[in-house]
Amino acid sequence: MFGPIGGDGQRRLAEASVAIVGCGALGSAIAETLTRAGVGELHLVDRDYVEWSNLQRQQLFVESDAEQMLPKVEAARLRLLKIRSDLALHTHFEDLDASLIRNLASKCSLIMDATDNFETRLLINDAALEAGIPWIYGACVGSSGSVFPFVPDRSACFRCLLPTLPAVNDTCDTAGIIAPAVQMTAALQCAEALKWLSGNREALLTKIHHFDLWNGSRLDTGIARIRQTDCPSCGPEPSYPALARTNRSAYAALCGRDTVQVLPDRERPVSLDDAERMARRLGEPFRRTPHFVEFHALGARFILFMNGRLLIHGAASVEEGRSLHRKVFG
């Protein structure tokens, strides 16, 4: 009954496929909103599991999810299908890489950004440009948030803006966040998604919208003039460098969490059985679920997921994480 959408727009929503990269605060709010709006197909991507501290702002999750340390995409799947049983829902419990984002961009109408780092956004930016589809940027921390729809050939792309972005940003883990800032950011992102998917593309934002709920401020900033004519992502001869990058480190410190992530080695995969045997050999108590094995060793907490990805909680740097990984797994 909302005039700009109408019956035709609702049918377009039902035929649409949307990828949501990240299933934490923004991602869970976006997934619920688009599910209730009638979007036909959703792809959820997230590498993490539910923790107690998430419940303050990640609206799809409940205490039992944190107790079981369910993967966020699995906990989200259980809730979303209770909201709408006919939703075509696909979950990807893994780290986003060039292969996965390319695959999603090739089959989706739109990509929703619910991430917390520049590296992943550059992957989304390049994959969306290569596929000729838009992606909707969203970021929030403290009481503030920013939103912008990046549409191919319409404005500067995310890589064009990098010279003006800080090397290190505050995150929810380092600066905190209030849930209304999450909900406002996600709501604005979803409004842009509904505009695009229902065919109301002339109504899309043309400036980056920034707000702060605590002091009541808002700012809209144009970025068309910032477009770089020689940009390797949106210039006349794009090379999409984020998708071409092959030297991604196996070790990465997760900002603000004293945690190091270790990506799986294809030539030497470690299974859940391997992790359980290692915990038994060390004489340490362990916990095994269908999704991961958790155990403590050398003052750190190790969580190995079924795809071979490892989190080492208690490692404050990549160097410490690398050392702990080699001491435990050789």
Image: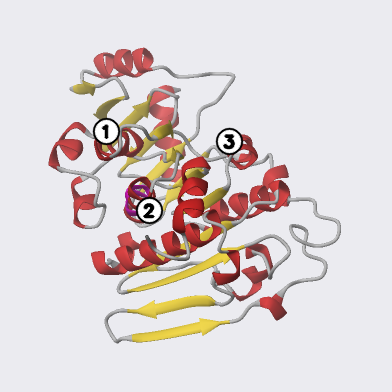
Q: Nearer the viewer, residue 78 or 25?
A: 78
Q: Nearer the viewer, residue 321 or 245?
A: 245
Q: Determine the main secondary structure of the stretch shown in magenta.
A: helix
Q: Earlier in the sequence, mark 1 or mark 2?
A: 2
Query: What residue is at 37 percent from the left and 60 percent from the top?
Result: 1
Callout 1 secondary element: helix
Amino acid type at image mark 2 = Ile
Residue 296, placed above or below residue 225: above
The answer to whether 53 appears left or right of 218 in the picture is: left
Check residue 221 for magenta coloring. Answer: no
Q: Which mark is residue 100?
A: 3
Q: Is residue 116 visible?
A: no
| Residue 214 in view in this figure | yes
Helix, strand, or loop for circle 3?
Answer: helix
CA distance for labels 1 and 2: 16 Å
Q: Is residue 195 above or below residue 45?
A: below
Calculate the distance from the C-alpha at mark 1 to the C-alpha at mark 3: 23 Å
Stretch in magenta: 27-32
**Tag 1 near tag 3, CB within 8 Å:** no
Judged from the image, the secondary structure of the residue bearing numbered disc 2 is: helix
Residue under pointer 1: 78
Which of labels 3 and 2 is toward the front?
Answer: 2
Mark drawn on residue 316: none
Q: Earlier in the sequence, mark 1 or mark 3?
A: 1
Residue 323, horizontal then vertical, whole percent: 43, 37
| N-terminal-most mark, 3 or 2 | 2
